[in-house]
Image (spheres, rainbow, N blue to C red):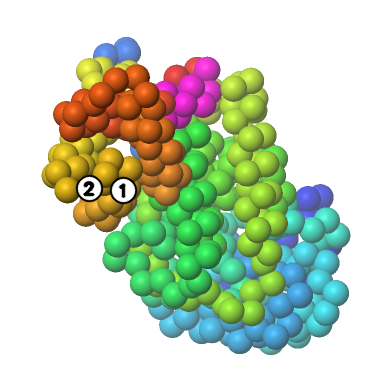
Amino acid sequence: MTLIDPATSSLRRRVHSAGFAGAASPAGQQALPQGGPEGRQLPRRSPVDTRVAVPVLDVAIPVFNEESRLEEGLRKLHRHLTESFPHTFQITVADNSSTDNTLRIAERLARELPELTVVRFQHRGRGNALRQVWLTSRSPVLAYMEADLSSDLSALAPLLAPLLSGHSDLAIGTRLARTSYVTRSPQRGFISRSYNSLLRTVLGARFSDAQCGFKAVRADVAHRLLPYTKDDGWFFDTELLVIAERCGLRVHEVPVDWTDDPNSSVDVVRTALADLRGMARLTRDLGRGRVPFTRLRQEIGRTPPAPQTGIPKSILRALAWTSVDVMVFLLLRGFMDPLPANLIALVFTSVATRMRFQGPLTLLLTLLLTSAALAVLPVITTPDRWLEGAALAVASLAVHIGRSLVGRRALAPDVA
C-alpha cells in the first residue's frame, strides 16, 4: 500500500512475526522528581517496552530515483533485521517524487514483504520525508539510513541498543572515529571534516559526524523535537542534533564502516552550500530564542546546563596545543626561516595529536593569523626567536579563544 503525504494520514503498520522480549515499563516513561530542589532527581528514560502491539523499530529509507539499487538494499536490510533484530520492525520507504521506476519497485516489494510500507511525497527533501514519517510513526524507536546502505549493517545493533535500554536519546553513526573504516574520496572526506569543524566552532556542537546517514532516535524524544526543525533537506540531521544537545539529551556515537557509492547522485558542492545556509539560519533562530529550550529541558532533558566554573577545558586544551606548537617552532627556527618553520610546526603538531584539538578550519585560521604575526613583527622591531615564539603563541591562542567564545555566543540565550 502506498500513502501520499502522511501528514494527515495514519501509516498502516504490519507486525513482524519474530520473537521478542523486553521490559514491561511503558515506552518513554520518566522518573518523577522527588522532594524539593535539593532532592530533585534528574529525568531518566525507562527501557522501551518491546511487547507493544506496533513494530518496535521503524526504519525510514528516503529515496529519489534509486531504481538501480533499491531492491538489493531493501532485501539486504530486511534479511538482516529478520535474522538479527529480536523484536518487531517496520521498513518505511519514503519516495520523494521519483521520476524513474523507484516507486514501482518499492510497491512490488511491499506486496512481497509484509514488513515493508511505501509512502510517496509530492514535496521533495530528505528532511521533509523523515520528519513526516517519524511524526506519524507509532513505533517507540525510529531510525533511518540511505538506500545504498553505505554503512555496514553490523553497526545497527550497537546503534539501537542504548535507545532500547533507555541509556541514550539519540544514536548516530560516525565515520570520523579512529576505529571507523571509511572508503570515500579525499574531496568528500575533507568537506565532511571541515563542515563538522565549522559546527563545533560556530554552534558549539559536540557530536563528531552530523552528516552520516545512519541515525536513530527514541520516538518520545523525536515527537517533541521535530516540530522545531525547519529544514526540509540535508541540513535536517544537523538541526535535530543541535536542538537535542541544547536540550541536554544524550547522543550516543557508534563508529561505522562506510563505503561511499561512486554512483551517488548527491551533488557534494550544492549540498555543502545548502548546509552552510542552514547553519546561518539556525544560528539566527537560536539567537532569537525560536526554540523554547528551558521548557523542553524541563520536559525531556536529562541534565540542566552546567554552570561554567574555572577555566574551560577548551582553553586548557588550547594552551597545551599551543605550547607544543611553539616548542616545535623554536626548534625548527634554529636552522629555518620563520614562515616555513611555522607551517611545519603546525602540521607536525596537528598530525601528532591526530587533529584532536583542531579541525581543518581552525588549523587554517591559525596558520593565517600566525603567519601574519610573524610577517608583521620585523616591521615593528628586530625580533629574536623567543619574541617570534611569543607572537606565534598569542596569535594561536587568539584563534582558539575566539573559536570558544563564538561557540558560546551561538548558544540560545537561556543556555549561554
Quick one: 319 or 314, which is closer to the camera?
319
Considering the numbered disc 2 on the image, is that residue within a helix, a strand or a loop? loop
Task: Tell me, yes or no, whether the highlighted magenta stretch contains residue 412.
Answer: yes
Q: Which amino acid does label 1 sit on?
A: Pro
Magenta stretch prevailing secondary structure:
helix
Task: Classify 379 as above or below 124.
Answer: above
Residues shaded magenta? 403-413
Asked whether, in this view, residue 301 is left or right of residue 107, the answer is: left
Asked whether, in this view, residue 362 is left or right of residue 240, the answer is: left
Q: Residue 340 carries which label?
A: 1
Asked whether, in this view, residue 397 is left or right of residue 20, the answer is: left
Task: Tell me, yes or no, whether the highlighted magenta stretch contains residue 232.
Answer: no
Q: Residue at x 59, y 79 (%)?
A: 262
- Residue 406: image location, x then y, percent: 47, 26
Q: Is residue 244 visible?
A: no
Q: Which mark is residue 158?
A: none
